[in-house]
Amino acid sequence: MKDNSLKTIGIIPARYGSTRFPGKPLALIAGVSLIQRTYENAVRCGCYDKLLVATDDARIYDHVKGFGGEVIMTSEQCPTGTDRVLEAANTLEALDDNDIIVNVQADEPLLGEGVVPALVNALNSDADVATPVTALPEEDIDDPSVVKCVIGTDGMALSFSRKIAPHDDKGTTPTYYKHLGIYAFRYHFLKEFATLAPTPLQQAEDLEQLKILEHGHAIAIAIVEDDGIGVDTPEDITKVEKILCRQNISS
């Protein structure tokens, strides 16, 4: 449960370079850039005391400034989005170690308004980081780009994998969960996370969150119904545009 005396800061890490989709944050979706749609969608959730984009590219910086968003330049040497989020957070004044820093994915323009409040609410005394999951669609079961999560009875993550888990050979049809790649960190743990050494499972699965579990830390899980849709490839733009058309959100 969130302490109302603490702040919730949303930081959207955005880089121009991408192997699969160069310039992705500036890609147009029905005439509006992906980063603008993600930023404005985050504003609509209404749960941030401060929201900003963290980038290492002048084109993204100028674009965010142009549509009236808050943005900060970060180093080109940040190895991950989480490192970029930490660098941006460290520039902010008067942060309490227990303030909540939300790593908002730049490629999630349709994330539901209830996801972040549920995520923040999931943080408790046993976990300094939380992340959401939703029911896994059957068509995504064998897709390695869709990360699966196994949850314990205490509401904490047991594991993450690109393969389906748990294995079911008894026909019990367990509920499978799809991980949504957004995180809420206590500020003090975000700083600690950046110092944790890489781990075998993290490197095998190429999943940064496994480093947290392998170092013995707990990840609280918020189960949500709203999936949103991530933009990983140029083909995903068309999918988002179709959803926007159905929702009559063209701009």
Image (spheres, rainbow, N blue to C red):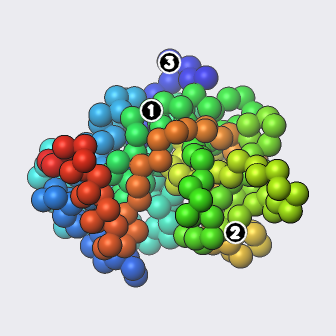
Decide which of 132, 194 is in the foreground and name it. 132
Q: Earlier in the sequence, mark 3 or mark 1?
A: 3
| CB-based contact (under 8 Å), mark 3 and mark 1 | no
Q: Residue at x 46, y 67 (%)?
A: 78
Q: Secondary structure at mark 2?
A: loop
Dot 2 crowding, Cα within 10 Å, few <14, some 14–19, many 20+: some
Q: Amino acid at mark 3?
A: Ser
Residue 190, image x, y percentages = 58, 48
Q: Which residue is mark 1?
A: 114
Check the image and name the residue furthest to the top: 4
**Mark sitting on residue 5:** 3
Q: Which residue is mark 2?
A: 163
Q: Amino acid at mark 1?
A: Gly
Q: In 3D space, how far apart are the residues under numbered discs 1 and 2 (Cα atoms)?
A: 28 Å
Above or below for 64 versus 221: below
Decide which of 158, 228 is in the foreground and name it. 228
Task: Mark 2 vs mark 3: give the one in front.
Answer: 2
Q: In 3D space, how far apart are the residues under numbered discs 3 and 1 (Cα atoms)?
A: 21 Å
Q: Residue at x 63, y 32 (%)?
A: 123
Q: Earlier in the sequence, mark 1 or mark 2?
A: 1
Q: In 3D space, how far apart are the residues under numbered discs 2 and 3 (Cα atoms)?
A: 40 Å
User: Can residue 244 be spotted in the picture?
Assistant: yes
Q: Residue at x 56, y 64 (%)?
A: 140
User: Can residue 88 be spotted in the picture?
Assistant: no
Residue 64, image x, y percentages = 20, 53
Q: Locate residue 75: give its quadrant.
A: bottom left
Q: Amino acid at mark 2?
A: Lys
